[in-house]
Image (tube, rainbow, N blue to C red):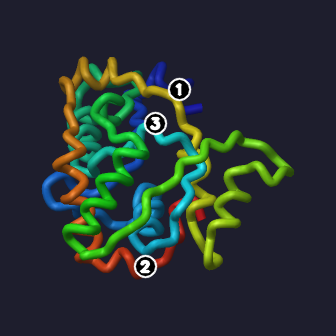
Amino acid sequence: LVRAEMTHLPISVFRPAMIVGHSDTGEVRTFNTYYVGLRRYLTGHLRVAPTSRHLRVNIVPVDYVADAIVRLTFEPAAAGTTFHLTAPPEALPTGAQMMRFARRWAREQLAVRLPRVVFVPVPRLRGTAASADELVRRGRPRSGSGVAALRPYLHEKRRFRRDNTDRMLGPYALRWQTYLPVLLDHAVARSFLHRSDRTVHE
């Protein structure tokens, strides 16, 4: 319906990745999606990840998304165009890189020694024990986890094209090695380790 209206209304479509904290401060309104897995790992409740260790974690800072939407909303040439507000795939950490970094950060900043995460790619099957949900349930010590709600992210293998975004805004390089400590520092300072696991999906 929206695309049909593009013929006579100045509509642009913005499709962001998993929005996380501000690139300079880590500030964010809610600790969901990306933060759910981090919370469970940092609190010792995530030993097995039902996904590939090579899967890119598709995160994007909230300030980049907000700035892009404001700039493109007031740009007449953006009308009728779809923009993926993502970081380039090569600038994103893999699941293994992210967990390895979090493990080192927890040891250095929290004096907590965490075990390595075991990555077990599980196909999306219904009605069998060999499903991501079942694997999460078996390894979950308490109810109410939001990890199962993240199942779509655990199998996301698409690469989102930035052609339109690069053309209108220029290239974007996210350095996750310097960005992750900012996210973790802010999240821990705001007691995210002690909050609910519920996610936006729930």
Q: Are marks 2 and 1 in contact (CB under 8 Å)?
A: no
Residue closer to the observer: 5 or 195: 195
Q: Secondary structure at mark 3?
A: loop
> What separation in Å lies between label 2 and label 1 (alpha carbons)?
39 Å
Q: Amino acid at mark 2?
A: Arg
Mark 3 is surrounded, within 10 Å at the Cα level, by few (under 14), some (14 to 19) or many (20 or more) other residues, namely some
Q: Which residue is mark 2?
A: 195
Question: Which disc, if any, is residue 136?
Answer: none
Identified by mark 1, the residue type is: Arg
Q: Residue at x 35, y 45 (%)?
A: 97
Report the front residue among 49 and 91.
49
Q: Which residue does the image show at 33% across and 54% down from the upper left? A: 20
State the residue position of label 3: 54
In terms of secondary structure, where does tag 2 sit?
Answer: loop
Question: Sequence-wise, which precedes: disc 2 or disc 1?
Answer: 1
The earlier-in-sequence mark between 3 and 1 is 1
- Mark nearer the viewer, 3 or 1: 3
Q: Quadrant of residue 65?
A: top left
